[in-house]
Image (cartoon, coloured by chain):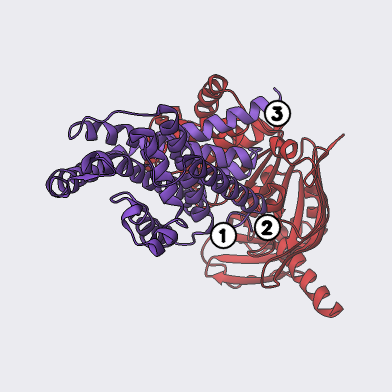
Amino acid sequence: MTNALEIKGLRKVYKGGFEALKGIDLTVQEGDFYALLGPNGAGKSTTIGVISSLVNKTEGKVTVFGYDLDTQLADLKRQIGLVPQEFNFNQFETVRQIVVNQAGYYGVPRKLAHQRSEKYLKQLGLWDKRDQPARALSGGMKRRLMIARALLHEPKLLILDEPTAGVDIELRRSMWDYLTQINKEGITIILTTHYLEEAEMLCRNIGIIDAGRIVENTSIKKLLTQLSRETFILDLAEGHKDISIDGFDSRWSDDNTLEVDVEKDAGLNNVFEQLSGQGAKVLSMRNKANRLEELFVHMVENGRKQEESSQ
Amino acid sequence: MSNASANIIALKTIWIKECTRFLRIWVQTLVPPAITMTLYFVIFGSIVGERIGTMSGVTYMEFIVPGLIMMSVITNSYSNVASSFFSAKFQRNIEEMLVSPVPTWAIILGYVGGGMARAMIVAVIVTFVSFMFVDISIAHIGYVILTVVLTSTLFALGGLLNGVFGKTFDDISIVPTFVLTPLTYLGGVFYSVSLLPEFWQNVSMANPILYMVNGFRYGFLGQSDVGIATAMWVLIAFNVVFFSGAYYLLEKGKGIRS
């Protein structure tokens, strides 16, 4: 299978000497739904900027579906649809002008661009707004417009830089459904996000970037097997503040809410047996934090410690 | 689809987008030059001009018409591209083009074509306005067209360079205010340089706008303060230099890529 994206030894040093990328290697296979995670300033947007040629790289090699960034730039650009983090369309143009013009930049004839604009604007629920200026759209509609714009030349690789930032839950879920659908239809997707739940739900593979280095590049499945401990929150009926659970770390966060740390292999049966034995009634239970979030924090911290010790 | 036809579609798209932009705000782009030039014709042409009499063998009104049309062409081609390109940078919608496979030459020609289109429309409007004040005939239509095309191209390229270098909206008003306007007024729009002392005549020869105004005046009236061939070559040379500069800067990503 062809690699959709291959990055080798990518470095970016900005004017002033700040090294945003310190020689990263990354491979994304065709058809993948890949998440690139990292804290603010980790280098996610710089990486995407280099791939989409908005940022000039200092060193390294980037290929997209075999097309080299240095020698086959136009062909490489044709493979990519980019949904940037910030709204970057002309707010005075209409929705349809924005998508049709974008198709034109890729050499799509105007008639075909109009046909495709109908298809994608309908799919993304923007067809009724086609003749409205972009500034009149809501934040969620503007996000969807950027997705439609990125798809009009029918790219093989769609890159989304935090596409659901500031989007309400309902819209976020409909965007997830749409992205899952187009991924199934064959479009490779690379997504950066702050919502770790989003990465866990959508993506098959994941790269964690921190301080300009890739600290992990694996499948979500494998990553989650590294998780050794989870914290569960149990909502109990009133009147059981005196109970204790042997063999587990636990604490009360309020009169009726108990937090219990459970090792991966320990299972929850023992917890429930002890609670039942003491007459406690469990009303509901949930994970304290997103599992991936715990791993993410752990990995980023480890990466930093390693870097500090190597200096 | 071949790369060549894809590039032509991209070029046409940028040009259409640019034309749509200035036509959408026609009250700001097309009406003001008509009003300003009408005032020039009334004040300098009719009221003051009648007391001046003739200049270079024609009435003062006939003398200033080509210069005033050229002044509109210069201002409009420059400001159209400078403001449009800078706004695209400011709003970051220039990225729409940068991430796509549009070649640099197509970006330049698309923007310049938009500036030229606005300049031509304004030139036609101002020419029609001038007909209300004077019966003017055209001596050499070829030179009229050639001069207006070369001039609008040159100043559209100038506007593009200004847009590339501009970091704030102030930056794109500095050049028109402190460079273009003085050079235009001193470029022989309202007088013949032959009226100046020899020293100032020589200084005026360093002003590129003098060649444009005179090339255009030659097309209308058949007379010029400078050789027509010289005027055309100066225009062509400046165009080549400005296009090369714009191409180099955009390829390098000056002001548009990190």
Residue A294 horizontal/vertical position (percent): 70, 62
| Comparing labels 1 and 2, the label whose residue is closer to the camera | 2
The residue labelled by disc 2 is A46
Residue B246 horizontal/vertical position (percent): 59, 50
Chain letter of disc 1? Answer: A
| Comparing labels 2 and 3, the label whose residue is closer to the camera | 3
Figure check: A39 above or below B250: below
Residue B174 horizontal/vertical position (percent): 40, 62
- Give whichever of discs 1 and 2 has the lower sequence position: 2
Inter-mark Cα distance, 1 to 2: 43 Å
> What letter labels the chain drawn in purple?
B
B106 left or right of A169?
right
Q: Are marks 1 and 2 in contact (CB under 8 Å)?
A: no
Tell me the kind of residue under disc 1: Asp
Report the quarter where the C terminus of chain B lies. Answer: bottom right
Tell me the shade of chain A.
red
Tell me the kind of residue under disc 2: Thr
A96 left or right of A46?
left
The residue labelled by disc 1 is A235
Residue depicted at 43% across the width and 45% down the height = B212
Q: Is residue B91 visible?
A: no
Between residue A44 and residue A256, name the one nearer to us: A44
| Comparing labels 3 and 1, the label whose residue is closer to the camera | 3
Between residue A205 and residue A263, name the one nearer to us: A205
Residue B39 horizontal/vertical position (percent): 18, 45
The residue labelled by disc 3 is B3
Q: What secondary structure is marked by label 1?
A: strand
Q: What secondary structure is marked by label 3?
A: helix
Tell me the kind of residue under disc 3: Asn
Figure check: B194 above or below A22: above
